């Protein structure tokens, strides 16, 4: 995970699509992530808020290489996630190490 360039989204996950197109997912807070049970992935965006200790609203935005927004994932406190467009929800270990992520 790298630092984002926008104050609203201080964290960024870099991935590629199955057609090797660059995708960047900017997240507002790390608490929107949870460990993934899916093979070959490390992190996923939460589908539901698990406690009231998370911020009132969490958001992840996926963009292409040019910065065009492809999708948005929002998670309200004690609610379910709302997806608009196409959002990268799962991140694999190879993508972490390739970009020097922790």
Image: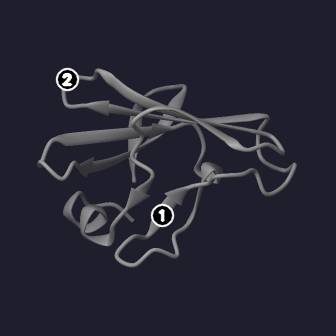
Report the side of 60 relative to 70 (left or right). Answer: right
Residue 66, labelled with which disc? 2
Classed neighbour count for the residue bearing mark 2: other residues with Cα under 10 Å, few (<14), some (14–19), many (≥20): few
Report the side of 20 relative to 87 (left or right). Answer: left
Q: Position of residue 62 (x, y in %)?
A: 38, 35
Location of the N terminus by quadrant is bottom left
- Judged from this view, the residue extending furthest toward the left is 20
Residue 86, compared with residue 45, is above or below; it is: above
Q: Going 29% across and 48% down the picture, which residue do you hit?
A: 14
- Sequence-earlier tag: 1 or 2: 1
Q: Position of residue 65 (x, y in %)?
A: 19, 31
Judged from the image, the secondary structure of the residue bearing numbered disc 2 is: loop
Residue 43, labelled with which disc? 1
Q: Going 62% across and 49% down the picture, which residue do you hit?
A: 32
Residue 79, labelled with which disc? none
State the separation of the CA atoms marked 1 and 2.
24 Å
Residue 92 appears in which quarter of the rendering? bottom left
Location of the C terminus by quadrant is bottom left
- Judged from this view, the residue extending furthest toward the right is 52
Residue 81 appears in which quarter of the rendering? top right
């Amino acid at each position: 995970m790298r630092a984002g360039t926008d104050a609203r989204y201080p964290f960024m996950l870099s991935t590629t699509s199955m057609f090797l197109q660059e995708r960047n997912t900017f997240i507002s807070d790390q608490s929107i992530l949870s460990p993934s049970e899916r093979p070959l992935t490390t992190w996923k965006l939460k589908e539901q808020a698990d406690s009231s200790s998370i911020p009132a609203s969490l958001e992840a935005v996926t963009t292409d290489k040019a910065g065009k927004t492809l999708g948005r994932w929002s998670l309200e406190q004690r609610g379910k996630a709302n997806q608009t467009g196409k959002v990268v929800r799962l991140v694999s270990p190879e993508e972490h190490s390739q970009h020097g992520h922790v």
